[in-house]
Image (cartoon, helix red, strand yellow):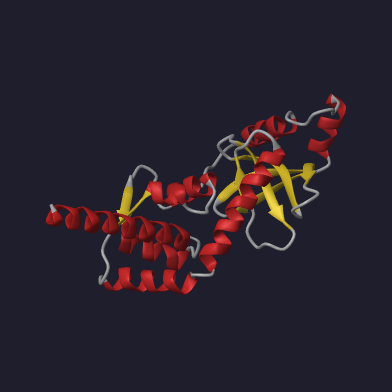
Amino acid sequence: MIFYSKQTETKLKETLVSTRSMTSLIEKEMSLATGGIKRETVNWVPMWVDWNNSVRSETSSATAMRAITDKGELLWYVRHDVKKHGYHSTELFPFDAIREANAAWDQRQMVKRKWSEVVTAQKELLRGSSKYRVTMQDAEDSALCTLGIAWFRMRWGIGRKASISGRMAAILMAIEPQVGFVIYQAQKRQAGQSSAQGLATSTAVAT
């Protein structure tokens, strides 16, 4: 958690409002006074959301709202009408953010269909019957958003680590179920590496 002064909060809000296009200075000042900017903490990302600066997709039932994190990172916070979790996108344009969010949601849906396998992998890691590292690249390759990953890592003091043990990842999944998407990606990588090593061994024996 980041603690900051009222002056810093005001500056963050002013920066957020300044991203509005086709809005007069008076309208921007009024938005600060009327409470159009709301405090949100979603998927570990603490931010201010400008609900009056939003773009609606006509095809995917999603809306992108301009937002800014406590560290001053500008983003589009994308929400879907029927999905539980939103998506934090650092894309510059809202429709690019919505496309990125939809791709991530599709990937999550695919993994959710195999969620029993993810739970089994978690149990094996906790028991120690499976042992492998879970890398930050696994997290980046998963269906999770980059900002959510970064803030989660900072919250749990693993922001500077290139990898953590699979058991630690399994413990974190018990706290935050979405870590399961990262475990799935790590398991997929491990399976690919094992297959590649097996093929290399077979080729060596054959020659």
Question: Would you place residue 106 above or below residue 92 in this image?
Answer: below
Residue 196 in which image quadrant: bottom left
Q: Horizontal placement of 195 versus 151: left or right? A: left
Q: Residue furthest top?
A: 25
Q: Position of residue 90 (x, y in %)?
A: 60, 38
Q: Horizontal placement of 171 versus 73: left or right? A: left
**Residue 203 visible in the picture:** yes
Q: Position of residue 73 (x, y in %)?
A: 58, 36
Q: Position of residue 49 (x, y in %)?
A: 70, 44
x 57%, y 38%: residue: 4
x 33%, y 45%: residue: 161
Q: Position of residue 181 (x, y in %)?
A: 47, 60
x 64%, y 54%: residue: 86
Q: As rendered, which of 175 and 182 lies closer to the eye?
A: 182
x 82%, y 31%: residue: 28
Question: Would you place residue 190 above or below residue 1 in this image?
Answer: below
Q: Residue furthest front?
A: 207
- Disc count in the image? 0
**Residue 158 visible in the picture:** no
Q: As rendered, which of 185 and 16 lies closer to the eye?
A: 185
